[in-house]
Amino acid sequence: MISWEIKELDEALGGMKKHSLILIHEVDPRSRGKELLYHIMKEKLKEGNLVGYFNLSYPVHMLINTLEKLGIPLKTTLKTGHWQ
């Protein structure tokens, strides 16, 4: 199994299968689910994994700025094709 990059989540869920599709759906914004999602997404991108992110709530420019602030260098990565 592949790590979620959060020890407690690995222990609770047992990791994830290789090539699996994982959907994290945040129902209540107060749950802070986005923080969990962004952490997992950042770690998976660092490893060179393909990550899909469906955003229905925020305009793209706000989303890009948020990801950049959280340490996900989206602008640079999209330009070069590599995590910087």
Image: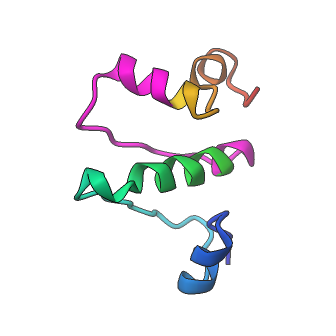
The image shows residue 68 at horizontal and vertical percentages of: 57, 25
Seen from the viewer's position, the closer of residues 20 and 6 is 6
What span is in magenta?
A: 44-66
Residue for point 34% across, 42% down: 54
Q: Is residue 74 depicted above or below 44 in this figure?
A: above
Residue 41 drawn at (x, y percent) = 56, 48
Kindly indicate the quadrant of the structure image that contains residue 48: top right
Does the magenta segment cover residue 54?
yes
Give the vertical position of 41 relative to 17 (above or below): above
Where is residue 24 drawn, in percent x and y? 38, 60
Side of 71 where 24 appears, left or right: left
- Between 9 and 29, the residue placed more toward the observer is 29
Q: Is residue 9 left or right of residue 3?
A: left
Question: Which quadrant of the rendered structure holds the C terminus?
Answer: top right
Q: Quadrant of the N terminus?
A: bottom right
- Which color scheme is applied? rainbow
> Which image quarter: residue 16?
bottom right
Identify the residue at horizontal 65%, vertical 43% (top origin). 45
- Residue appearing at x 38%, y 16% in the figure: 61
Question: In the figure, 19 relative to 74: above or below?
Answer: below
Q: Is residue 28 left or right of residue 20?
A: left
Q: How many marks?
A: 0
Indicate left or right for 42 with 61 as reference.
right
State the residue at coordinates (46%, 23%). 64
Residue 31 included in the magenta stretch of the image:
no
How far across and how far down the image is residue 62, in percent?
Answer: 37, 21
Say which of 57 and 19 sits in front.
Answer: 57
